[in-house]
Image (cartoon, rainbow, N blue to C red):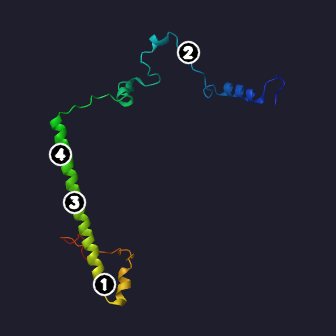
Amino acid sequence: MTTRLGSSSGEVALRALRRIAPSLSRGFAKKVKGGKASQSAGGMKGVQPDLQPWLPLILKPQKQAKPTFTKEELQDAERRAKEYSRQKSYQNLAWRRDMETKFRLRNEAFAALPEVLQHPANEPDLEPFPLTRRIPTDYPPAAWPL
């Protein structure tokens, strides 16, 4: 829709808004005169001056030289890694044997029960703990007779 002056209603509303609240309208960036010589921040446009010393630490991690190891150090590291792996394997084997023994003993205990009690013994107990449950401690609580 155009008005009498030939401009659209959107343009009229935009001009009215600019007259009412000039701070609400967005202006375009001005061209910096002087080229690269006037940029004192070194390409950090729009950054507060007190934050500029920290930006290189955040933006670009410094490349560190790769450590070089001698043949003896590499062989020692390999030996220690193999020993660690071997010990963890033994530890895992001992844990699996322990769990297997516990499962076997549990199943033997269930089998030793009378037929009437075997089915209820296999069902999980999902009853919540009582709210007034007392936890055993070395000393009685301050308010002992509850």
Q: Is residue 70 left or right of residue 59?
A: left
In the depicted structure, whether residue 6 falls above or below residue 91:
above
Disc assigned to residue 31: 2
Task: Decide: few, some or many residues near mark 1? Use Cα within 10 Å; few <14, some 14-19, many ≥20.
Answer: few
Distance (Cα) linking label 1 and label 3: 30 Å
Residue located beneath label 3 in the image: 91
Q: Earlier in the sequence, mark 1 or mark 2?
A: 2
Distance (Cα) linking label 3 and label 4: 18 Å
Return the x and y of residue 11 as percentages of the image width and height: 74, 26
Q: Residue at x 32, y 28 (%)?
A: 63
**Badge 1 element:** helix
In the depicted structure, whether residue 97 falls above or below residue 7:
below
Q: Amino acid at mark 1?
A: Ala
Task: Decide: few, some or many residues near mark 3? Use Cα within 10 Å; few <14, some 14-19, many ≥20.
Answer: few
Disc assigned to residue 111: 1
Residue located beneath label 4 in the image: 79
**Badge 2 element:** loop
